[in-house]
């Protein structure tokens, strides 16, 4: 499972840069405010960095069971957090 976390984190970082330079890849991008448009790519890049850093942190700490599921945890927990922060910041 070690082989999955780092490539998945790099994939998320790559997607973040793609979205940053070509934002039309996201559905509904034109309806976002200017501040949200600037933060979309940064959030995806941050999720990728958290996956990679979490992998190395939990390997170093010896929590192998958490290492096996770090990509899943960050994706499932991180996405609702990002959506809720977006709704709080835009007052929706």
Image (cartoon, rainbow, N blue to C red):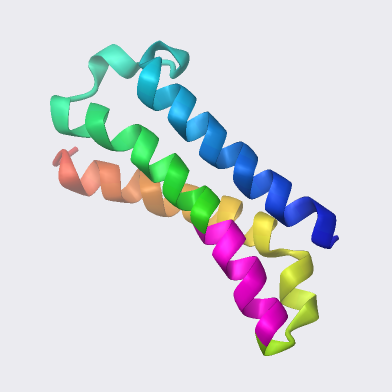
- Majority SS type along the magenta span: helix
Q: Nearer the viewer, residue 22 or 73?
A: 22
- Is residue 4 shown above or below 12? below
The quarter of the picture where the C terminus appears is top left
User: Residue at horizontal 43%, vertical 16%?
Assistant: 27
- Is residue 48 shown above or below 68? above
Q: What x and y, as percent, mark residue 40?
A: 34, 34
Judged left or right of residue 43, residue 3 is right
User: Residue at horizontal 45%, vertical 43%?
Assistant: 45
Q: Quadrant of residue 72?
A: bottom right
User: Residue at horizontal 53%, vertical 30%?
Assistant: 15
Q: What x and y, as percent, mark residue 71?
A: 67, 56
First to last magenta residue range: 50-60
Q: Is residue 62 magenta?
A: no
Q: Quadrant of residue 62?
A: bottom right
The quarter of the picture where the N terminus appears is bottom right
């Amino acid at each position: 499972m070690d082989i999955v976390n780092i490539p998945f984190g790099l994939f998320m970082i790559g997607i973040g840069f793609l979205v940053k330079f070509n934002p039309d890849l996201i559905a509904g991008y034109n309806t976002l405010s200017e501040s949200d448009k600037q933060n979309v790519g940064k959030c995806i890049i941050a999720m990728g960095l958290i996956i990679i850093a979490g992998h190395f942190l939990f390997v170093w700490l010896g929590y192998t069971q958490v290492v096996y599921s770090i990509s899943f945890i960050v994706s499932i927990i991180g996405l609702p957090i990002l959506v809720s922060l977006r709704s709080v910041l835009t007052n929706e």
